[in-house]
Image (tube, rainbow, N blue to C red):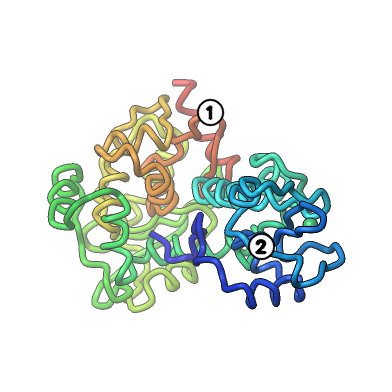
Amino acid sequence: MNQMTRLEPAPSPMPDDDACWAAFLARDRAMDGRFVGCVATTGIYCKPSCAARHPKRENMTFLPDPVAARAAGYRACLRCHPDEIGRDRLAVAAAIAFIEATEEPLRLEALADHVGYAPHHFHRLFRRETGLTPAAYARGLRAERLKDALGQAGSVTAAIYEAGYNAPSRAYADAEKHLGMSLSAWKDGGRGVTIRWRTIDSSLGPVLVAATGKGLCRISFGEGEADLRVRFPHADFRPADTALDAMAQRVAALVENPAAGADLPVDVQGTAFQQAIWAALRAIPPGETRSYGDIAAAIGRPQAVRAAGTACGGNNLAVLIPCHRVLRSDGSAGGYAWGLDRKQALLAREKRK
Ligand SMILES: [Zn+2]
């Protein structure tokens, strides 16, 4: 779903000997993991960035990886720990998976703890492997998710294939079946669409309620007109009319008592996969919760756990599409686009009933 750089387990093939030697002389970190240098006089092997004094060129041979070096009778250097490159890469890959499965910004400490590294060390490692800090990576990912939520061209097919569909037509057919929502064309930033909106007070703060002539297109906490204009830059905005006022009242009542549900018309744009996920969310009974894995399985795509999490994060209709009923697989609260406190408050209200 996102186009960000992926870590490949095995980068390009090993460079030639001259390039390897040059990498050692330059202590080039970018070459770590692509080969090791074996020193005949000491019997050890090093990664290119090793800080130890360089041996003479004629005493050094280059091999693709630590396995080959050990097979040739060399031992790992105790200074540069050449065997840890693979472990580091795995840790970074695991951290990326963790970031992608979590909707809210993660603290560095939590991330490092998740992969078993000290925070400061892990920060450097992550940056070395990806060129980005964990925070910058997460920001980029959220930007991608927002683009997805806005229905940018290109994301539809990617999302469908990521979700494991063989062909888009199949995905659309499934989505139609799961939905009960209009697959309204939200392309081009809402051009030609009239949106009426207002905010209404609730015990969890002001709620933005916006609707087209077909139904609700945005329910969110703490947003206003500026947010709507970012989301639908070409729409024609009008003040609330009596129909919208009535819907807003019912949305406010739903916030106070989410278990009651509300049969309100919706007009949300999203990829077929997102729409299927949102339909699955609406099927969770009040007072119950599901994991992202449950939701992915519910639409017949058990492998698409991460994409399911992303689609939950892209929900446009707070409370009405109850993404607050999805928790992490370990039962902890996970993320919520509108703040964990609100998520917990909504769940507590449902449990009381
Ligand atoms: Zn070394």
Any part of residue 80 in sight: yes
Residue 213, placed above or below residue 278: below
Can you tell which quarter of the image residue 218 is in?
A: bottom left
Whole-percent x, y for residue 289 in the image: 42, 28
Q: Which of 304 and 195 is in front in this view?
A: 304
Report the disc number at residue 92: none
Crowding around mark 1 (Cα neighbors within 10 Å: few <14, some 14 to 19, many 20+) is few
Can you tell which quarter of the image residue 204 is in?
A: top right
Residue 13 left/right relative to 156:
right
Give the amino acid type for the residue marked by disc 1 in the picture.
Asp
Residue 306 left/right relative to 331:
left
Whole-percent x, y for residue 46 in the image: 74, 57
Q: Which of marks 2 and 1 is in front?
A: 2
Q: Residue at x 76, y 66 (%)?
A: 59
Q: Residue at x 52, y 27 (%)?
A: 331
The residue under label 2 is 32
Q: Does the residue labelled 1 lie within 8 Å of ligand 1?
A: no
- Dividing the image into four quarters, tell me where ligand 1 lies: bottom right
Residue 141, placed above or below residue 230: above
**Mark 2 → mark 1, Cα distance in angstroms:** 36 Å
Q: Nearer the viewer, residue 52 or 321?
A: 52
Quarter of the C terminus within the rendering: top left
The residue under label 1 is 330
**Mark 2 or mark 1: whose residue is earlier in sequence:** 2
Residue 313 left/right relative to 339:
left
Can you tell which quarter of the image residue 334 is in?
A: top right
